Image (spheres, rainbow, N blue to C red):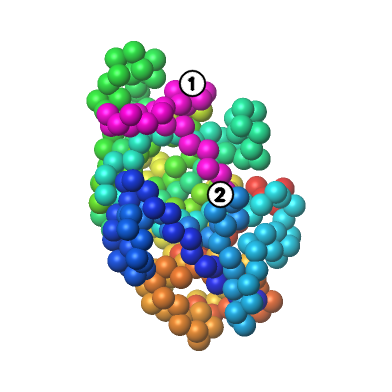
Amino acid sequence: MIFKSVFQFRPMPWGNFLLNHIFKLEEQNPIGEVWLLSDHPLMKTKLLDEDGKEYDPSILLDCFNLNLPRFPLLLKLISSSQWLSVQVHPDDEIAKKIENEPWGKTECWYFLQNSLVAFLNPNSDFEQCLEKNDWAENLVFLKPEKGDFIFIPAGLAHALGPDSMLIEIQQSSDLTYRIYDWGRKRETHLEKAKLSLKKFDLDKLFISSFCHFESEYFEIYKVIGRTYLASNAIVIALEEGKINENKANVYDTYVVVNEKPTKVEGTFLVIKLGKKWFS
C-alpha cells in the first residue's frame, strides 16, 4: 500500500515567499514551513491511498506495528528569509520530566540550496553568555551547500540563517527553548535551555554531499535512478520522478507500506524508522 501525504502550510514571520510561489498559494503571509508528514496534534497531514480514500495519519501506527502515542517522525520543508532564533530542544528525559511529553526533539537537515546556519560554540560558557548578553559573539557559523546534511541532536543550540531552504526530519515534538533572538523581543526560555544544553563536536555532525545517515531515531539515505523498496519507508521526491509508474512531483511525500517491492525512479530521500521505536 502507498499513502500520499496532503501537505499543511504554516506562515511564519521569518518565512519566505519562495514557498508560496512553489506551491502556488494565495496566502498573503510568507510560508515558513510546509509540513510534509505529521501526526502531531498541532498540525496533522491527511493521507490518501491509491484510490483517493482519506485516512488520519494515526493509521501509520498500525501499519508500522507501533505502540506509541503518535507516529514518531515529523517531516517539514523549511525556507527562511531572516535569522531564526538561537534555540535548543530537550531530549526525551527532559521532555518527559518537565513537559509531560512522550519525547524530545532530535532532528536533522538536508539542504536544498546553499544556506547559512549557526551553532553555539561548544567552548562557550552559558552563564557568561547570559551575564554579558554576547550570544552572537559566541556562535560558530557554517555555510552548508546544496546536498549537504547536518544532524542536530537534542541539546545542540542552533539557528537557521536567512535565504536557507531544507528538509527537516525530526521526532514528532514541538518543544523549543529560545535562547537568543537577534534583538527581537520574543520570549526566551533560558532556564529550560540551560537544563537542555549539551556539548557536541560539530565536525562529527556535518555530512558533505549526503548519501546516508543512521541514528537511533531514523535512518535516511538518498537514492538516484531506479530503486526497489522492500520494507516500510517514507519517501520524499527531490525532483520529478515516479513511484510504481505514477508521477511524483518535487517534494511529494509518500509512505510505503510494503506488501511487495515498490519501484521508485528519480531522486528521493528515503526515511526509515530507527530501532528505538521498536524497542
- 152 falls in the magenta region: no
Report the quarter where the N terminus lies: bottom right
Q: Position of residue 35 (x, y in %)?
A: 48, 58
Local secondary structure at mark 1: helix
Q: Nearer the viewer, residue 14 or 129?
A: 14
Q: Which residue shows up at 48% across the image and 46% down it?
A: 107
Identified at 63% across, 72% down, the residue is: 54
Q: Is residue 182 magenta?
A: yes
Q: Residue at x 33, y 32 (%)?
A: 181
Q: Which residues are magenta?
A: 172-195
Q: Which mark is residue 27?
A: none
Q: Is residue 203 positioned above or below 135 on the image?
A: below
| Amino acid type of the residue tagged 1 in the rendering | Glu
Q: Is 278 displayed left or right of 111 in the figure? A: right
Question: Of label 2 and label 1, which has the lower sequence position?
Answer: 2
Which numbered mark, 2 or 1, is in the foreground of this view? 2
The image shows residue 188 at horizontal and vertical percentages of 41, 27
Label 2 environment density (alpha carbons within 10 Å; few <14, some 14–19, many ≥20): few
Give the structural element (helix, strand or loop) at label 2: loop
From the top left corner, tell me how far across and down residue 150 is, in percent: 39, 47
Drawn side of residue 108 relative to residue 182, left or right:
right
Q: Nearer the viewer, residue 41 or 28?
A: 28
Q: Residue furthest bottom?
A: 245
Q: Looking at the image, is 172 positioned above or below residue 136? A: below
Q: Which residue is mark 1?
A: 191
Percent x, y of residue 28: 32, 58
Check disc 2 and report the residue beneath it.
42
In the rendered view, would you say 196 is above or below 252? above
